[in-house]
Image (cartoon, helix red, strand yellow):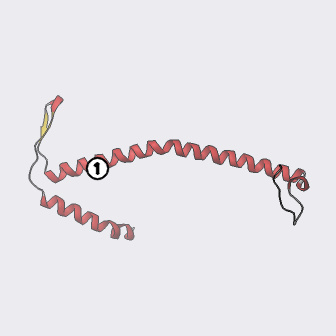
């Protein structure tokens, strides 16, 4: 916990300095709803930054869903193949493994 706070403290210091340096109000109007408010510029910019980070993280998460699904399928197939290989080795290990000291050759 203390290490996290130590690593986050420079980032938090930059955020505090940014917020103190930009106290002027920013007029924001949401056009179709006629909503308007005047937050400090630092708050408005940090909210937009947070929303952008959140949307980027969601897009990255969605794109990796397919990769994670493929990895799970490959792990399942690998486990099935390993169990089949173990069963085959138990059934007749001499037919699968070549005698010691011989080289495997490709058929021509």
Q: Name the quadrant containing residue 104.
A: bottom right
Q: Secondary structure at mark 1?
A: helix
Residue 99 in percent (x, y) is at 90, 61
Q: Is residue 20 left or right of residue 4?
A: left
Q: Residue at x 11, y 44 (%)?
A: 38
> Eyeballing the image, is 98 above or below 75?
below
Q: Residues within 10 Å of mark 1 (few under 14, many from 20)?
A: few
Residue 24 in percent (x, y) is at 8, 53
Residue 79 in percent (x, y) is at 71, 49
Q: Quadrant of the N terminus?
A: bottom left
Q: Residue furthest left?
A: 24
Q: Residue at x 83, y 50 (%)?
A: 107
Q: Name the quadrant containing residue 33.
A: top left
Residue 58 in percent (x, y) is at 39, 44
Q: Is residue 95 left or right of residue 31?
A: right
Q: Residue at x 48, y 45 (%)?
A: 64
Give whichever of 59, 27 is nearer the camera: 59
> Eyeballing the image, is 100 above or below 93?
below
Give whichever of 30, 103 is nearer the camera: 103
Residue pointed to by mark 1: 50
Q: Is residue 83 left or right of residue 96?
A: left
Give whichever of 15, 80 is nearer the camera: 80
How many discs mark residues in the rendered view? 1
> Eyeballing the image, is 33 above or below 95?
above
Q: Residue furthest top?
A: 32
């Amino acid at each position: 916990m203390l290490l996290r706070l130590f690593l986050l403290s420079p980032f938090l210091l930059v955020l505090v300095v940014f917020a103190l340096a930009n106290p002027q109000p920013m007029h924001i109007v949401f056009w179709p709803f006629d909503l308007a408010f005047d937050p400090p510029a630092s708050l408005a910019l940090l909210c937009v930054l947070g929303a952008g980070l959140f949307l980027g993280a969601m897009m990255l998460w969605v794109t990796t869903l397919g990769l994670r699904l493929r990895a799970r399928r490959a792990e399942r197939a690998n486990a099935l193949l390993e169990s089949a290989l173990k069963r085959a080795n138990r059934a007749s290990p001499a037919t699968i493994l070549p005698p010691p000291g011989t080289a495997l050759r490709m058929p021509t």
